Image (tube, rainbow, N blue to C red):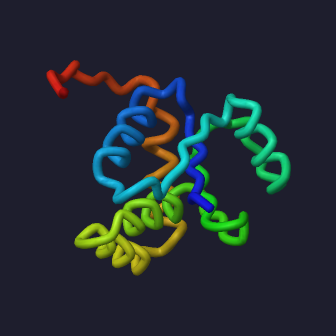
Amino acid sequence: MKNIIIFDQKCLMCSKTVAFLTKRESGDFFEYVSYHSPKGVDLLKSLAIDFSYEQYIVYIKGDCKRVFKRSDAVIEIVADLGGWWSLARAALIIPKRVRDWAYNRVARNRKTLKYEESQES
């Protein structure tokens, strides 16, 4: 079973992050699901996750046995890219409340961030 990343497809930063991950993942490791999609809504309901604020990413590993949110999700997703990326888990030494505070600051402002269009192929 693939690991599932539930994200805000309407958010440019989130979509760019998915593009970044897609280029770097080995094989078909992640499944990307918008939380606005029927599958996203059903998964969140089955996990009893309130997504009314739409301000955090959810990462589901395996058969819904391990669920990560906010900064824990980001760290786990990046680390699961393998190789040098696995060093991301070192960020877990930072207290969760500090990591989530920083994550929440970015999440609250993510839709106001501006991006230059790149000439990526």
Which residue reaches farthest left?
119
Residue at 38%, 61% in the rendered image? 78
Q: Is residue 87 above or below residue 119?
A: below
Q: Is residue 45 above or below residue 35?
A: below
Camera-side residue of 102 and 64: 64
Camera-side residue of 75 and 43: 43
Measured as percent of width and height from the top left, residue 90 is found at 34, 78
Q: Quadrant of the C terminus?
A: top left
Measured as percent of width and height from the top left, residue 106 is found at 43, 42
Task: Give the quadrant of residue 119.
Answer: top left
Which residue reaches farthest top?
117
Classify residue 29 as left or right of residue 119: right
Q: Quadrant of the N terminus?
A: bottom right
Q: Is residue 63 above or below residue 102?
A: below
Camera-side residue of 55 and 17: 17
Measured as percent of width and height from the top left, residue 6 is found at 60, 45
Q: How many marks?
A: 0
Residue at 36%, 34% in the rendered image? 16
Residue at 33%, 73% in the rendered image? 86
Residue at 51%, 48% in the rendered image? 104
